[in-house]
Image (tube, grey):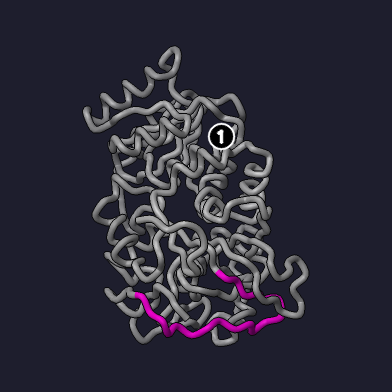
Amino acid sequence: MRALAYFAKGDIHFTKDLVEPKISTPDELILEINYCGICGTDLHEYIDGPIFFPEDGETNELSGSGLPQAMGHEIAGTVVKIGPKVTKFKVGDHVVVQPNGTCKDRYRWPHSPHVNKPWCSACKKGHYNVCSNLGLIGNGVQSGGCAERMCINESHCFKVPKDMPMDIAALIQPIAVSWHAIKVARFKRGGSVLVIGGGPIGLCTLLALQGHGCSDIVVSEPAKVRRELAERMGATTYDPSQHNTEKNIQNLRKMILGGDGFDYVFDNSGTPETLETAIECLTVRGTAVNVAMWPPHKRVEFSPMAVTKEEKIYTGSMCYTQFDFEGVIDAFERGLIDKDIARHMITAKVPIEDGLEDAILRLITHKEQTIKLLLTPNLHGELDS
């Protein structure tokens, strides 16, 4: 079948010959992919990989799957075949995919080196989003959504209403990342919010906050195009590129009446400067959440008294759970997240044949002018580039 696939280090390309997926366990189903978004993780695999994909000639340690694999984990598709023990879905249903692979999924992969090992402590406690063996479908665990079809077990799928446009449905996965961060923050309606970074996850955080009833949101973002987009989506914006970190902290705090700082800060940028800004822009007992993916061995200076003296909280948020997907879908159904506002995030839709040049490389070379590019493996919907 047709796919945009990862073949080896430095080798991502379109193919017509990726092996068709087959149902191997009775609770699996086959999806025909309508749209699949390109994520920053995909870009890093092209620039610096393999990071999560296995090395040439090796296999993924969770699933035992080798290369090539179709990329893509921001997936919206239509059910075209179901296994004999699928109970939640029928052929024709529209679904989105929760793409994290964990201990819970090992039964699907009898060749996994971990198949007979005990679950990790996180999965035993129900916190599978921080599984010790965590991986992503479409990013090393198994083939993902940048292909005509994929196979997945039903526990990873969530039905979306037939009246929801499937391009909007493809945004549910990245919004779920932010939805989980808001849950981690223990967000209470009425709190003041600063979002650091107006890229895809920053704008998803804006949408997720709106889904939680928050309307007073400041987005700090250096790129003019992204600030303008955040404003169209309902935020007040700030340009941090004109000043140093200390001055930015002062200016941002002044945006809150009394200059006391924000109740919540979500850092989607992940730099030493934004970490400092996140903590220093908090009010007393405020909460800052790191949503950004830092390099795994990155170290930064940190003063414990920056949080201790005013009992601030600094924490992290990782991936999502089924409740986050259900929460986002419900927010769309109830109109708490506006579909037309969400659509602002979609920069273009690109056929998978052009996925490397017109999606991955475009996002790398024109990062500030693009937000979300969707690949269309089955040519659903209007294409544009």
Examine the rendered structure and indicate whether residue 113 appears above or below residue 71.
below
Examine the rendered structure and indicate whether residue 115 appears above or below residue 337.
below
**Of all residues shown, which one is farthest toward the front?**
382
The chief SS type of the magenta part is loop
Examine the rendered structure and indicate whether residue 354 appears above or below residue 273.
below
Q: Nearer the viewer, residue 15 or 238?
A: 15
Q: Where residue 133 sits: x, y (%)?
A: 51, 69
Quadrant location of residue 31? bottom right
Examine the rendered structure and indicate whether residue 116 appears above or below residue 162.
below
Q: Does the magenta-highlighted stretch encompass residue 17? A: yes
- Around disc 1, counting alpha carbons within 10 Å, would you say few (fewer than 14), some (14 to 19), or many (20 or more)? many
Which residue does the image show at 58% across and 82% down from the upper left? Answer: 109
Q: Where residue 251 sits: x, y (%)?
A: 32, 21
Question: Which amino acid is tagged 1?
Answer: Gln
Which residue does the image show at 46% across and 36% down from the upper left? Answer: 288
Q: Is residue 319 left or right of residue 254?
A: right
Judge whether residue 123 can be spotted in this image. yes
Task: Give the magenta part as a residue range.
Answer: 14-32
Q: Does the magenta-highlighted stretch encompass residue 248? A: no
Q: Where residue 292 sits: x, y (%)?
A: 40, 48
Q: Is residue 110 left or right of residue 144?
A: right
Give the number of marks. 1
Which residue does the image show at 42% across and 26% down from the upper left? Answer: 236
Which residue does the image show at 67% across and 55% down from the upper left? Answer: 162
Q: Nearer the viewer, residue 340 or 138?
A: 340
